[in-house]
Amino acid sequence: MAVRIRLARMGKKKKPSYRIVVVDSKKPRYTEFIDEIGYYDPLRNELQTRIDLEKLKEWMKRGAELTPAVSRLLKTIQREIPQTEVNNG
């Protein structure tokens, strides 16, 4: 089973928020997900994101692929947050 880590849109009309989820890559976008590993709110002034790094690392070890959107989001988070905060959780 090919697994991907991607964004699932939530929220209201014109007020999106996203869950960062693990899903089977062959299933449609709005389907049951295997695991939820975080969320992202793009409408906040400050970076409003929570990601469980332990779950992310575990799924990456199992062979889960990141979508381009999640990959860009992780790069943005690494730039915004000092490295000591990322390592300490």
Image (cartoon, rainbow, N blue to C red):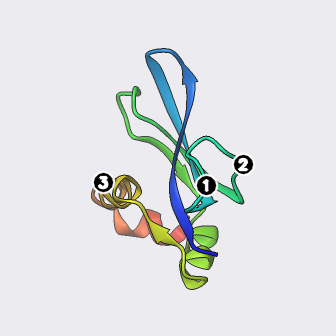
Q: Residues within 10 Å of mark 2 (few under 14, many from 20)?
A: few
Where residue 66 sits, quadrant-wise, is bottom left
Secondary structure of the residue carrying tag 3 is helix
Secondary structure of the residue carrying tag 1 is loop
Say which amino acid is labelled 3.
Thr
Q: Nearer the viewer, mark 2 or mark 1?
A: 1
* Residue under label 2: 32
* Residue under label 3: 76
Where residue 44 sits, quadrant-wise, is top left
Q: Say the numbered circle drawn on residue 53.
A: none
Q: Is residue 2 left or right of residue 82?
A: right
Q: Nearer the viewer, mark 2 or mark 3?
A: 2
Distance of label 3 from label 1 (alpha carbons): 27 Å
Secondary structure of the residue carrying tag 2 is loop
Image marks 2 and 1: residues in contact by CB distance under 8 Å: yes
Q: Say the numbered circle drawn on residue 27.
A: 1
Q: Residues within 10 Å of mark 1 (few under 14, many from 20)?
A: few
